[in-house]
């Protein structure tokens, strides 16, 4: 398909590097270099060789194929930040007024990589390229997809997040934790929380997320804490563990019970019966199950 | 009223196949020709790759598309397809269009619509024919039909006048009833129609504070209540849906005030039912809502969690509190039975300590049968 003839060679020195989108996977020195028109498509950091190594300094030029097809062959997978950077480079190098086909190229390129070239995602891509490079790398490393980054669509200027990337990078959360953290941060910032409220000294992702969650869901957090403290005042059976837990839109008591013989079970049940009566007869406790 | 609607629409696209429809003639007579465009079958107008962006969705409310509908007009209520997770009344929907010219922050169409235009189906005659055929087999059953599932029943009615042939059809049905469900105040266009008391005009209502905050472009509470009074004067039964109830700082005061107002103003009216529901939406909808309404909205700010049905809802204890509050207030001030819409069996039990089918006044609404 990509047959080469003698006319398809250029020298590296004659090639431009305007499409250097800083791909995450380095181009191996063992592989030949490729270009489209006079633009290098890979190996952007290849050194120009001296004149007695000219055979290594040649670049194969793609002919008869359009830019997106060539790029897909050379870079089979591109993360969202990578395609965002590449899109930016293409638009700068092949602006619409000189290359009317470039808009179509971008659309085709996105489709080839499985991204939907929706107008709002193209805008999101532009915003992503303005993020600190370390953040873009983190997004790539964790494989965050456009839908994971949907909260960023609501932010006009991603600079408002600049104060928080450091925490994210230092905690290096998993993909799902990071996605959750970004969404909570975006919502809290847009709700008007200040940098002072949002910045916290935390060493674990879990405590960072709990902290953000408590700010984002203050009523439920308060209610859950209140319920948890009430639960502790109840006389649970020996060798049992009771705690207030939230499962989606429902919250309630999770009880772990240990018994090693039927007698112990009976004693436990009597204890539980008593708790049930206490809860029924005590308004404050019954309120655990009805929130205002 | 019509002028306001016309000015809110930037372009009207008319499918060639709709050229002989009555609604087309009316639209052509109402809109300036500069807003009209004729389109062909393979128009790129309705084809959209994937979900709509926030911008395209907002724009869709300003583009009206008149086209014949090729599928089945008549469907069961969405709650019925999730019987395990939700307890829902026995209700059928007749879709005469898609999308709405109003703009509620919580509107579920935001996660549902895939077409970048507001569509009105031109072949109302086919819809009525479908109803006619159904009535031959099921005319003896107590069937409740609504037109406000994916479009507001009445907000565009001054343009289409679809209420009129529907009222006419239902005037010949002994056992069926029709519900126009709206957040508009557009009733004048059908009030002169003869009816047999089986066309219910219903309003989704909320306190004015919620309307101002979340139900953009809808009629004010006062306008809705005035329209309800006009309908009552013409003998139409009415209904109210306190749905979605939205939690906010003064929710108790505001909802109680609303319930008192309704009870006072409609004490002697033929109120067919009151339903209450609390805020709920598909998880993916939160993104477009955030983009379109920011984070100062009571809806985007809401403390909602994934529920068994997959939708995001308030904490179940809070829901029960809200339902109990509304139901107690209705009991205190009015004689009307209250039902809970699109809710889980747990919430029914927690609120009423019963399933709806065990509540005498609500039994008829929840007796299921299949067509
Ligand atoms: S009136 Fe109904 S259909 Fe229209 S925007 Fe509001 S919720 Fe959506």
Image (cartoon, rainbow, N blue to C red):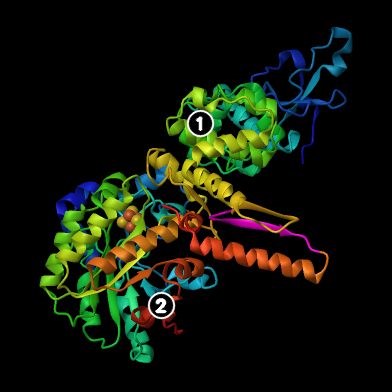
The picture quadrant where one finds residue A66 is: top right
Q: Residue at x 26, y 86 (%)?
A: B173
- The residue closer to the viewer here, B261 or B173, is B261
* Secondary structure at numbered mark 1: loop
Q: Position of residue B267 (x, y in %)?
A: 16, 70
Q: Is A258 one of the magenta-colored residues? A: yes
Tell whether B233 sits left or right of B219: left
In the picture of the structure, the residue carrying the numbered disc 1 is A100
**In front: A206, or B78?**
A206
Q: CA distance from mark 1 to mark 2?
A: 56 Å
Residue B73: image tag: none
| Quarter that holds the N terminus of chain A | top right
Q: Are marks 1 and 2 in contact (CB under 8 Å)?
A: no
Q: Residue at x 27, y 50 (%)?
A: B211
Q: Residue at x 75, y 68 (%)?
A: A265
Of residues B60 and A155, the one nearer the viewer is A155
Q: Which residue is mark 2?
A: B90
Give the secondary structure at mark 2.
Answer: loop
Q: Chain of mark 2?
A: B
Q: Position of residue B109 (x, y in %)?
A: 41, 56
Query: Where does the magenta region start and end?
Result: A247-259
């Amino acid at each position: 398909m990509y047959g080469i003839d003698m006319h398809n060679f250029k020298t590296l020195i004659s090639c431009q590097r305007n499409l250097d989108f800083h791909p995450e996977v380095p181009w191996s020195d063992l592989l030949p270099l490729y270009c489209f028109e006079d633009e290098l498509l890979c190996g952007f950091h290849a050194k120009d060789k001296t004149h007695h190594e000219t055979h290594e300094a040649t670049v194969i030029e793609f002919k008869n194929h359009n830019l997106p097809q060539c790029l897909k062959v050379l870079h089979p997978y591109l993360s969202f930040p990578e395609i965002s950077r590449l899109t930016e480079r293409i638009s700068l190098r092949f602006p619409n007024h000189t290359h009317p086909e470039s808009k179509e190229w971008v659309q085709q390129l996105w489709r080839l990589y499985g991204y939907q070239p929706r107008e709002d995602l193209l805008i999101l891509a532009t915003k992503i390229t303005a993020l600190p490079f370390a953040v873009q790398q983190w997004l790539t490393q964790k494989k965050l997809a456009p839908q994971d980054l949907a909260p960023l669509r609501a932010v006009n200027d991603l600079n408002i997040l600049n104060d928080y990337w450091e925490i994210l990078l230092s905690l290096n959360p998993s993909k799902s934790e990071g996605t959750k953290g970004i969404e909570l941060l975006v919502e809290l910032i847009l709700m008007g929380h200040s940098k002072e409220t949002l910045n916290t000294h935390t060493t674990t992702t879990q405590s960072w997320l709990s902290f953000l969650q408590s700010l984002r869901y203050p009523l439920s957090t308060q209610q859950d804490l209140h319920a948890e403290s009430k639960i502790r005042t109840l006389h649970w059976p020996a060798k049992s563990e009771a705690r207030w837990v939230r499962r989606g839109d429902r919250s309630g008591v999770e009880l772990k019970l240990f018994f090693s013989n039927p007698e112990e079970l009976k004693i436990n049940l009597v204890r539980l019966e008593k708790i049930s009566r206490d809860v029924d007869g005590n308004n404050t406790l019954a309120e655990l199950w009805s929130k205002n | 009223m019509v002028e306001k609607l016309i000015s809110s629409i930037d372009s009207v696209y008319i499918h060639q196949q709709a050229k002989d429809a009555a609604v087309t003639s009316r639209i052509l007579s109402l809109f300036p020709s500069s807003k009209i465009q004729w389109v062909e079958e393979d128009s790129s107008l309705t084809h959209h790759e994937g979900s709509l962006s926030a911008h395209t969705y907002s724009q869709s409310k300003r583009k009206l598309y008149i086209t014949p509908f090729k599928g089945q007009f008549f469907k069961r209520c969405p709650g019925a397809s999730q019987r395990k997770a939700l307890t829902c009344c026995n209700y059928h929907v007749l879709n005469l269009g898609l999308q709405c010219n109003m703009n509620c922050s919580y509107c579920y169409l935001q996660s549902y619509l895939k077409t970048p235009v507001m569509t009105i189906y031109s072949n109302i005659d086919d819809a009525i024919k479908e109803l006619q055929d159904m009535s031959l087999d099921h005319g003896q059953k107590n069937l409740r039909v609504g037109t406000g599932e994916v479009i507001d029943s009445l907000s565009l009615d001054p343009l289409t006048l679809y209420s009129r042939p529907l009222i006419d059809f239902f005037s010949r049905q002994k056992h069926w009833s029709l519900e126009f469900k709206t957040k508009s105040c557009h009733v004048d266009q059908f009030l002169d129609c003869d009816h047999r008391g089986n066309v219910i005009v219903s309003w989704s209502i909320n306190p004015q504070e919620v309307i101002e905050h979340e139900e953009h472009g809808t009629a004010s509470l006062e306008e809705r209540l005035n329209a309800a009074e006009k309908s009552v004067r013409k003998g139409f039964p009415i209904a109210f849906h306190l749905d979605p109830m939205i939690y906010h700082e003064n929710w108790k005061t505001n909802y109680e005030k609303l319930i008192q107002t309704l009870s006072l103003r409609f004490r002697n009216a033929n109120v067919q039912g009151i339903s209450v529901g609390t805020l709920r939406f598909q998880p993916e909808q939160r993104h477009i809502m955030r983009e379109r309404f920011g984070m100062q909205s009571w809806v985007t700010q809401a403390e909602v969690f994934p529920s068994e049905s997959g939708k995001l809802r308030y904490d179940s204890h809070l829901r029960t509190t809200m339902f109990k509050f509304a139901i107690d207030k209705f009991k205190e001030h009015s004689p009307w039975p209250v039902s809970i819409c699109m809710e889980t069996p747990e919430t029914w039990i927690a609120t009423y300590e019963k399933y709806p089918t065990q509540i005498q006044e609500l039994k008829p609404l929840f007796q299921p049968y299949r067509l």
